[in-house]
Image (cartoon, rainbow, N blue to C red):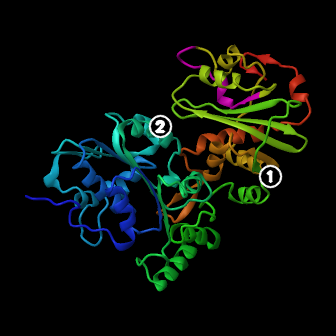
Amino acid sequence: MEVILPYNWRPRQYQKPLWQYLEKGGKRAIAVWHRRAGKDDVVLHRIAVAAHTRVANYWHLLPEAAQARKAIWTAINPHTGKRRIDEAFPPALRETTLENEMMIRFKCGSVYQLAGSDNYDSLVGAAPAGVVFSEWALANPSAWAFIRPMLLENDGWAAFVYTPRGRNHGSTFFEQHKRDPDWFVELLSAEQTTVFTAEQLASERADMIKEYGPEDGQNRYAQEYLCSFDAGVIGSYYGPQFEKIDAEGRICPVPIDPGYPVHTAWDLGISDSTAIWLAQVVGLQMRVVGYIQNSGVGLEWYARELDKWDCRWGEHILPHDAAAKELGTGRTREETLRSLGLRRTRILPASSIGDGINAARLLLARSWFDEKATERGVNCLRNYRREWDDRRKAFHDRPLHDWASDGADSWRYLALANLRSDDEAMTRPIVYDDRGIV
């Protein structure tokens, strides 16, 4: 059976610039397109052609593996009744198809792997020659930092296809590269393509407002159809606070004031990342001067990172579970940190997430953030949101646990610590019992 790629598909008129850029060997592409514009159709067929032009690994990453399976692997094209992957990758070209692993090995030797970018460091095998980041605005931004060196070494290409989700790394990425001659960067709203009529768009807007409510519905429509970066993140806990922070210009250079101690607030991960905020309290202001996050490293790594800062340390705020003894060492993580030189630790009592979120909102009202040193942490706070129940068409009363959670959790601890601007924290007597500091 002769198969001509792309298989039974041709790019629509508005899709041609992206297709032609990649077809001619372009290495970096950003396509901020509206909902149902066919973003993943373009990149799926592009991977099919690339895999039979250069034998290599090709990765297609969505924010989570479950989302990848639902949106790509098992998704059916309603116009044809066929699976999307079968349309892009005809079975006649395949050697094996591994359903559980969402992997296809082609007869030519190339491999297609669909996965979640939330576990980017678990991807194995030879470095890829092409990577697609679908729904990049919802993905873990650390994934690109991890994968980029592989593509540089392998002379590979990357495509980022997404709709906006507020002012986060997706908007920053777009702004950083839109004038870069080495990148293809394009934003297409539904008003610029021929996918929907004006009547269909008006109906969709009305339905979203009815489903999500006036504010969230309008924001969702503006994001998904108008490709607006200014619409708030749907279900965001701190959206209104960051609207005010942005309007008042409180994300700017924030130098360390040597007259005040720098406090840290930790979210101590085990399987997740560990996230640390660094801040000074000056009068009524919380001046946030840094943010550190990593995963897969021990507490020694974080202690070394803090050693690089030229400052006077205040308190190191730890969550309540830092007092629990670890099975492997018999020591608490607070004891480990103290042995590494972090002497003035304080363990917070357990509290509800709701109380912490309320405290976090109050703290945001008086906070200033260093624009460079806290960018990653600010992205976490902007994207910290309630979990949506699509069956009930309502938000859960719990946060969505994703890449933004660690930074948001450590911010809650900073807020609950109730730090003050005088040096009381530096002179407070340290009282011990058999659990550690009281």
> Quadrant where the N terminus lies?
bottom left
For this orientation, the residue located farthest to the left is 1
Which label number is shown at residue 139?
none
Could you tell me the amino acid type at mark 1? Answer: Ala
Q: From the image, tell me which residue sits under label 1.
A: 365
Tag 1, which secondary structure?
A: loop
Packing grade of label 2 (10 A; few <14, some 14-19, many >=20) is few
Indicate left or right for 285 with 17 as reference: right
| Residue 201 coordinates in the image, percent (x, y) | 49, 80
Q: Earlier in the sequence, mark 1 or mark 2?
A: 2
Indicate left or right for 111 with 120 as reference: left
Q: Residue at x 92, y 33 (%)?
A: 422
Residue 351 belongs to magenta span: no
> Quadrant where the C terminus lies?
top right
**Which quarter of the figure has residue 58?**
top left
| Residue 265 coordinates in the image, percent (x, y) | 72, 33
Residue 317 belongs to magenta span: yes
Instruction: In the rendered view, tell whether residue 32 sits above or below residue 140.
Output: below
Front-lying residue, 362 or 435: 362
Which label number is shown at residue 146?
2
Indicate left or right for 242 with 32 as reference: right
| Residue 264 coordinates in the image, percent (x, y) | 74, 31
Whether residue 74 can be seen here: no
For this orientation, the residue located farthest to the front is 181
C-alpha distance separating marks 1 and 2 = 34 Å
Tag 2, which secondary structure?
A: helix
Query: Which region shows up in magenta?
Result: 316-329
Could you tell me the amino acid type at mark 2? Answer: Phe
Q: Residue at x 60, y 22 (%)?
A: 301
Front-lying residue, 186 or 80: 186
Q: Residue at x 36, y 73 (%)?
A: 13
**Which quarter of the figure has residue 417?**
top right
